[in-house]
Image (cartoon, grey):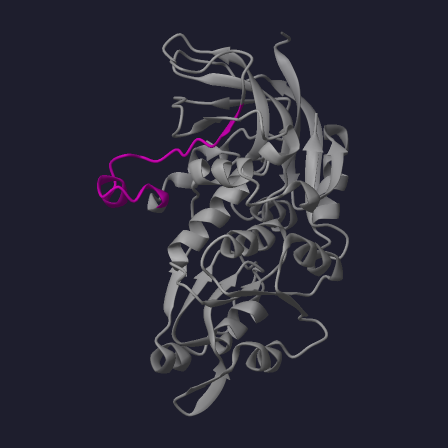
């Protein structure tokens, strides 16, 4: 094996260059994977476009599938040649949140994690430090192909989001945003007890993907009044001094300020609003709606890899049709530019 590899390196907003960099060194507790596919996450798009979350010189990428090519001598139950994926979270282990087993809230999380601080998978090889099967590394079952396997991480986020929403029998759900996360959140809800799942989105391409993925109803948010249409679809939700819609659960996977603002009108009083999208700009929130409607508001960070693998293996979630484009690593910047256009793409991947 050569000592160097090709990687897409971040130099600044909308400046991504394929360079030759050292292959990560593998310690006694680490593993090295040869990357097969890596998806472009919404957070990667924010980083690429604005510089959020990362510094110059970063190799992004945390949604990947690969093959194990090196295993540290202290690592057990992981073999060279097996297909795998994972995400190393570099928590400190000593802060208030770590001590209370709330590791995703550790302030150090993104300073030393795969694709954030540590080199990620927009490279020919990626390292998982302190590799632990079932924790930060997961073997890919034979039933899941390599492209689908590169969506395990975002499916894990979607699965956790739905679990946090605690859907009940007969719930009416609105998912705002139909990128991969929104589409998968919809599919996971459809596999649960929800009675109706409606998807809103500004991109016709993504709305079509939502229809093909099983959404009950879709709304083009660029052409229709979302709140008024939802009043017709899920019922009018009167509350103190006003009225909105009657959605039991609203998930914002759009990451747009307008979606954030609409979510408080769409949810019924006492319903649930879950935020998984990451807006680049601040939303204007009327807190009187929080006072008068008292919704349960949750932030969704982290994922459940084990459940994601189960959902994909059992066919309850299908992500392969959502992969709209693949690009070779040499065209990484073109891949990012394509992912930035919601009217052109759903999910874009780098292939090796």
Q: Percent position (x, y) of residue 188?
A: 51, 51
Look at the picture and state if 204 lies above or below 352: below
Residue at the spot 47% in from the left edge and 17% down from the top edge = 31
Look at the picture and state if 316 lies above or below 94: below
Q: Percent position (x, y) of residue 222?
A: 70, 71
Is residue 80 something one can see in this rendering?
A: yes
Q: Is residue 336 left or right of residue 287?
A: right
Q: Which residues are magenta?
A: 84-104
Front position in the image: 39 or 60: 39
Residue at the spot 29% in from the left edge and 44% down from the top edge = 102
Residue at the spot 40% in from the left edge and 28% down from the top edge = 134
Residue at the spot 47% in from the left edge and 60% down from the top edge = 275
Front position in the image: 181 or 127: 181
Is residue 59 something one can see in this rendering?
A: no
Question: Does the stretch in magenta take in 299?
Answer: no
Look at the picture and state if 330 lies above or below 43: above
Q: Quadrant of the N terminus?
A: top right
Question: Does the stretch in magenta take in 92?
Answer: yes
Look at the picture and state if 316 lies above or below 87: below
Q: Is residue 36 left or right of residue 111?
A: right
Q: Percent position (x, y) of residue 22?
A: 59, 17
Write down the quadrant of residue 225 in the picture. Answer: bottom right
């Amino acid at each position: 094996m050569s000592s160097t590899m090709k990687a897409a390196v971040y130099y600044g907003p909308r400046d991504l260059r394929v360079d030759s960099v050292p292959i990560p060194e593998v310690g006694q507790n680490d593993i090295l994977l040869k990357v097969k596919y890596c998806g472009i996450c919404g957070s990667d798009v924010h980083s690429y476009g604005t510089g959020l979350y990362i510094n110059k010189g970063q190799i992004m990428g945390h949604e990947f599938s690969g093959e194990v090519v090196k295993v540290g001598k202290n690592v057990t139950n992981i073999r060279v040649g097996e297909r795998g994926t994972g995400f190393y979270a570099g928590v400190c282990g000593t802060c208030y949140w770590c001590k209370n087993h709330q590791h995703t809230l550790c302030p150090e999380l993104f300073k030393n994690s795969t694709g954030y601080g540590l080199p990620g998978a927009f490279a020919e090889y990626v390292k998982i430090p302190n590799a632990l099967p079932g924790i930060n590394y997961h073997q890919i079952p034979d039933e899941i192909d390599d492209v689908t396997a590169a969506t395990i991480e975002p499916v894990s986020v979607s699965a956790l989001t739905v679990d946090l929403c605690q859907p009940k029998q007969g719930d009416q759900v609105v998912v705002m945003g139909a990128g991969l996360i929104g589409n998968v959140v919809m599919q996971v809800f459809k596999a649960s007890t929800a009675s109706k799942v409606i998807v809103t989105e500004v991109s016709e391409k993504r709305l079509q993907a939502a229809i093909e993925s099983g959404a009950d109803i879709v709304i083009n948010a660029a052409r229709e009044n979302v709140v008024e249409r939802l009043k017709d679809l899920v019922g009018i939700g009167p509350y103190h001094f006003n009225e909105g819609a009657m959605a039991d659960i609203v998930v914002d996977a759009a990451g747009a300020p307008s979606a954030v603002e609409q979510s408080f009108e769409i949810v019924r009083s006492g319903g649930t609003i879950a935020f998984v999208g990451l807006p680049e700009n601040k939303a204007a929130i009327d807190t009187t709606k929080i006072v008068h409607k008292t919704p349960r508001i949750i932030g969704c960070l982290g994922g459940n890899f084990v459940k994601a693998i189960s959902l994909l293996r059992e066919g309850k979630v299908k992500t392969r049709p959502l992969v709209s484009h693949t690009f070779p690593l040499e065209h990484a910047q073109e891949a990012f530019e394509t992912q930035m256009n919601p009217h052109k793409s759903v999910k874009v991947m780098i292939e090796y």
